[in-house]
Amino acid sequence: MSYSRESQMRRQSGLTLVELMVALAIGSFLIIGAVQIYNQSRQAFVVNESIARVQETAQFAMDTIEADLRMASNWGRSSRGLAVEGRSLDGEANPNDLTVPTPTCGDGWAFDLALPIDGSDNGYTLPCGASGGAQANSDVVTVRRVSVQPVAPESGRLQVQSTRIQGRLFDDGAVPGEFLPVTNHPITGAPSSATHNLMVNSYYVSPTSALIPGVPTLRRKTLTMRNGAPFIADLEVAPGVENIQLQLGIDVNEDNTVDRYVDPGDDIYNPAATGYVPGARVMTARVWLVVRGVSPELGLQDARNYQPGNVTLGTPDDEFRRLQISKTILLRNART
């Protein structure tokens, strides 16, 4: 009986100090390895999420601008801005005394239909103020067109009535007399003229966002209505856009191909200007965007030299992730 008790006590004895130290060492190595794997996975997730957000912002901003640019010079049933009566003329920005949108960006901002795509190069030149200021060395891109779908005439709204050969800009809600009666084609059933809302958008970059203070953002001045009158709203489009650049591909010999690219603001349509190109037509628009993350990333140092369009932005040398993208956009109404 005594032998059995002594044998049982030996079998129930604990670990030796050496065995305990070895077990603790092995356990520590396992824990440290698990923590390192977690930290690496977490860091990879954060980096991938940051890249995805920057790419998503860039894609959204580019898609928004592209959709507008593709439809530039769409005047309803025609694509000839020079055939629309009531547009701005040389020396007379508002020949028909139409209601000027407020806050004023100048009469020509809404009525210069001869320039479906307009802008300023590396600076903000619109007479209406930029919300939050304007980013230095960034272009302004202005697009003029009408709504895709016909609408009913509306008093107070700037609209275009057009046929396949002519159009008229009006704001009294009454179809201009020269387009009456509006009849339907006996075969196609298409109306002889149609009413469309005038659309004008100016894209620019502000150094600070109203949604995320301190973050640059793409903004858009857009023609809309307020209290029954034309109004220019200033809307935030995409926080994170740091710079926008534009170049226009023009056809100078009427062969429907791009002969060269010019910067916005080059007065290719004005015979009195040094940049005048007789018979020039804008065929494409090349857009660059520089987009940055909304918050700095620990351990990241952006040492890239950014050169979108015709501007050199230099090396930021900070901890923000950036992406530069560009796209050449074909204007759908350029050849008609």
Image (cartoon, grey):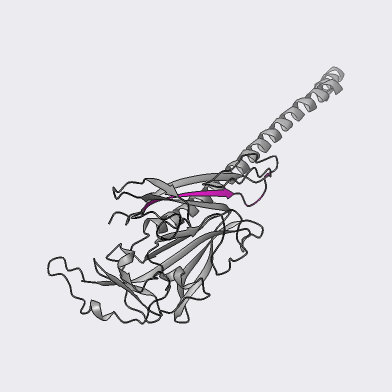
Is the C terminus in the top left, top right, bottom left or bottom right quadrant?
bottom left
Looking at the image, residue 146 lies above or below residue 17: below
Give residue 117's position: percent from left, percent from top: 42, 59
In magenta stretch: residue 247:
no
Give residue 97's position: percent from left, percent from top: 41, 80
Q: Is residue 133 left or right of residue 96?
A: right
In this view of the protein, which residue sits in the foreground, 275 or 238? Answer: 275
Is the N terminus in the top left, top right, bottom left or bottom right quadrant?
top right
Residue at image position (46%, 73%) is 107
Instruction: Look at the image and tell me whether residue 53 can be seen.
Output: no
Instruction: Look at the image and tell me whether residue 91 can be seen.
Output: yes
Main secondary-structure element of the magenta-colored stretch: strand
Residue at image position (27%, 72%) is 194
Q: Quadrant of residue 36?
A: top right
Q: Is residue 306 left or right of residue 141?
A: right
In the image as oriented, which residue stretches furthest toward the left? 186
Give residue 133's position: percent from left, percent from top: 62, 63
Give residue 147's position: percent from left, percent from top: 36, 67
Residue at image position (82%, 19%) is 7
Q: Is residue 65 left or right of residue 42?
A: left
* Count of numbered circles in the view: 0
Q: Quadrant of residue 230?
A: bottom left
In this view of the protein, which residue sits in the foreground, 210 or 196? Answer: 196
In this view of the protein, which residue sits in the foreground, 126 or 19? Answer: 126
Q: Which residues are magenta?
A: 282-297
In this view of the protein, which residue sits in the foreground, 150 or 30? Answer: 150
In magenta stretch: residue 287:
yes
